[in-house]
Amino acid sequence: MDEKRQFESFKNNLLLWNKRMNLTAIVDDADIQIKHFNDSLTLVSLLPAGNIRMIDVGAGAGFPSIPLKIMRPDIRLTLLDSLRKRIDFLTDTVSLLGLENTVCIHARAEDLQKQSEHKNSYDICVARAVAKLDKLCAWCIPFLKPDGRFIAMKGPNVHAELEEAQNTIERLGAVVADIHYFELAEGLVHSAIVIKKTSGSGGVPPAGSGAGPSGVWGRAPRS
């Protein structure tokens, strides 16, 4: 199945399953293309070359990871979600699209990150609009190898969340490497925060932590 047919089959399966369960409020073809597919594919340029291992935490309806896998079939992909129904959808979609080296796991990130085959094991972790950045970092950074990257997909106004998350980022042995802004359509700007793990296994920070030193990263979106 070529890429065009894979995207079409993905869209049709998404809409089919969406009649049975709440996967997405975006159901118009043009909106799916822009707000799901194009948004996901903004990360293609941020992924390293080579046979990388990637985990999507809170994979939901499969964004951004399934579009990325379609464009980069060499990726070894893990789709993680805590809701069994979403994992059932993802498993069906992976089979339908013929995606190889892709596993779907029903678990909580806090539990899976403790397992030796997943802790400190991934080159890339992605998450899209799952929770505030402070929580996302605690869930995602422990999955990364040293020098691995966590890419958090957010809206255009991210600096307040970054300041709140800074202490957690440091405690987990990571640094904010960059922020990339993408204009998907007129007036629709999303960001990708790239956080690099610089040390081995950082511990999970205590509950309530997150206040840290202020800082300014990245580039402002175009006006």
Image: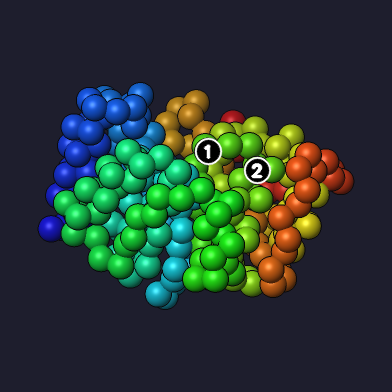
Provide the secondary structure element on which disc 1 rests: loop
Question: Can you identify the residue that label 1 sits on?
Answer: 130
x and y percentages locating residue 100 in the rendered image: 25, 65
Provide the secondary structure element on which disc 2 rests: helix
Instruction: Specify the quadrant of the image occupied by residue 132.
Output: top right
x and y percentages locating residue 18 in the rendered image: 26, 29
Amino acid on which disc 1 is placed: Val
x and y percentages locating residue 121 in the rendered image: 53, 70
Any mark on residue 197, and which? none
Residue positioned 32% across, 38% down in the render: 85
Residue positioned 69% across, 43% down in the render: 134
Any mark on residue 135, and which? 2
Mark 1 or mark 2: which comes first in sequence? 1
x and y percentages locating residue 136 in the rendered image: 61, 46
* In the displayed structure image, the side of residue 15 where residue 102 appears, left or right: right
Q: How far, Cα to Cα, is label 1 from label 2?
A: 9 Å
Q: Relative to residue 145, is residue 71 depicted above or below?
A: above
Q: Relative to residue 30, is residue 125 depicted above or below?
A: below
Front-lying residue, 128 or 222: 128
Neighbours of disc 1 within 10 Å: few (<14), some (14-19), many (20+): some
